[in-house]
Amino acid sequence: MRKILNKIPKNFKTVFFEIIGILFLLALWEIIALCVNDPFIFPNLSNIFTSFGEILSISSTYTAIGESLLRTILSLIISFVFAFILGLLAGLFKLIKDFLAPLVYILKLVPTPCVVYFIIIFFLKEPNIGSLIITFLIVFPILYESFVEGLNNIDDSIKLSLRIEGYYSFKSIFRVLIPQAMPFLLLGCINSIGLGVKVSIMSEILIGTESLRGIGRLIHNYRLNAEYSHMIALTLLIIFIFIIIDIIFSYIKKILKK
């Protein structure tokens, strides 16, 4: 058996076993559904795929996806701008890095649900702003640390030569330092995108108001109406979107590592 497997190309083996893993999960789901024997509580695959087709035929699904992604992109842009400015200053000036360290540690260590509920209380009347802030507070530390790490990992000889010629000049920062730190910056951006989408959807679910439209709001409505097969089908759709995003950015990561 091992000899046969060794003759199979590595890429083919990877795809083959991934397909086997997916089929195993589907079989396990169907077995659990048969054991529960209550399609209302735990729908089987047939009900889920039927609901999947139904949500794909509704225009509101695509509107919700678009609004969630736009809100996430806006949050990521805001996070990037703040993280870039503060990360650049922290990377160049140690005193600023030390000053911002407590804030960054707190944002990293505070449980996400606590942040979400705290923001919901203060932005109850402005749920869209609340969702943006929630995503910002979760994503910002990742981007900030990527920027600082990128600047800190620049070769000391480059820093020394720039210090002699004018280390903090506008030209040296944007023509030498930032290009040298760019792999870390881009990887930080890539890693924060998936997390940003997840946090944005989670904030929509927890805020749960009609004025905050998006994928999370649809999931919230399906849960309130006890349409569990639709809720699971929509979750599968989100997973497919994440898979597509992950494939795209995994490819970008490979290019950057080269």
Image (tube, rainbow, N blue to C red):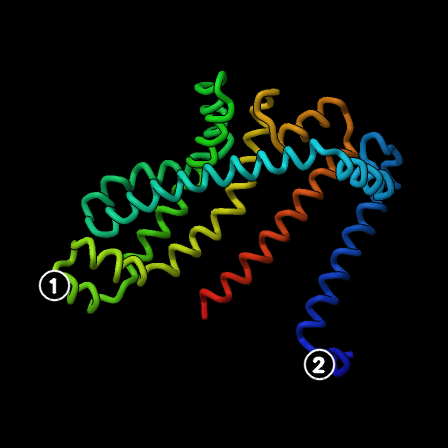
Q: Residues within 10 Å of mark 2 (few under 14, many from 20)?
A: few
Q: Amino acid at mark 2?
A: Asn
> What amino acid type should be assigned to the residue bearing mark 1?
Glu
Q: Is residue 104 above or below residue 158?
A: above
In this rendering, would 63 be left or right of 20?
A: left
Residue 228, position as x, y percentages in the image: 77, 31
Q: Position of residue 151 (x, y in %)?
A: 28, 57
Residue tagged 1:
165
Where in the figure is residue 102, as x and y percent of width and height? 30, 38
- Would you say 198 lies left or right of 100 here? right
Q: Residue at x 42, y 52 (%)?
A: 188
The image quarter containing residue 156 is bottom left
Q: Residue at x 56, y 24 (%)?
A: 207
CB under 8 Å between discs 1 and 2: no
- The local secondary structure at tag 2 comes to helix
Is residue 150 among what the camera can see?
Answer: yes
- Seen in the picture, residue 117 relative to 183 is either above or below; the reply is above
SS at mark 1? Answer: helix
The one of 66 and 115 positioned closer to us in this rendering = 66
Quadrant of the rendering where the C terminus is positioned: bottom left
Q: Is residue 235 left or right of residue 251?
A: right
